[in-house]
Amino acid sequence: MWYYLSVFVAAFLVDLLPFFGPPAWTVMVYFQMRFDLNIWFVLISGVLGSALGRYVLFLYIPYLSDRFIKVEKNEDLHFIGAKLAEKGWKIQLFVLLYTLMPLPTTTLFSAAGIAKIKAIYIVPTFLIGKFLSDMLMVFTGDYVANNTASFLEGFLTWKSLSGIALGIFVLCMLLFIDWRKLLIDKKLTLNFHILK
């Protein structure tokens, strides 16, 4: 039983980080293969730990933002968050599609937290998408574990690197575009001086 609690805690800690770290599914695969655990219990405990980690990240990232990002940029991000919240089901659809793709969700939760989008728009849909995408990864984990050499060879592929690059690009767009000017004045303005 403590193995499944360990999966929960490890997935929680990995997804609590405000920067890119290893995906939670790698923790799940490790525990499942190392201790020959029930794959469904690993998946359930790992996804719940991951979701709780992302939710806590969502809660504390605004405090980091307030401390390190200029007031004007924070107001801009809150404005875009309010605009996005007007279209609640579109946010949920975006979150579902985003979590089904092999993209890091750190960017998603950091952006949503800084923009102060309500957690109800993010977390439930994240749970669904996370469960489905991690299920695929955990079930293929057995194959990967048994073929470690070929997995490590393909780890730094153009797909994995492009996923990380896309996540960083989305975060940069959120931080460096003046969203108020773009949405109100229809004028694209970049501002790279966002730190205090």
Image: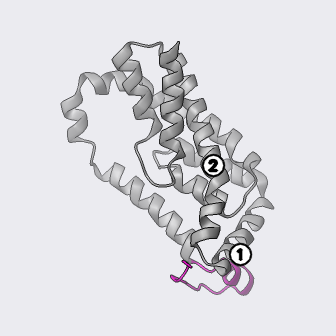
Q: Position of residue 76 (x, y in %)?
A: 68, 76
Q: Give the secondary structure at mark 2.
A: helix
Is 179 colored magenta in this rendering?
yes
Residue 31 makes an appearance in the image: yes
* Left or right: where 86 falls relative to 109: right
> CA gap, disc 1 to disc 2?
23 Å
Q: Give the number of the disc on residue 95.
A: 2
Which kind of residue does numbered mark 2 sit on?
A: Val
Q: As displayed, is residue 108 above or below residue 124?
A: below
Which residue is disc 1 drawn over?
Answer: 75
Residue 97, how many percent across, how many down? 59, 46
Name which residue type carries label 1. Answer: Glu
* Residue 105 drawn at (x, y percent): 53, 49
Residue at point 46% right, 29% down?
136
Q: Which residues are magenta?
A: 177-196
> In the rendered view, would you say 113 is above or below 69?
above
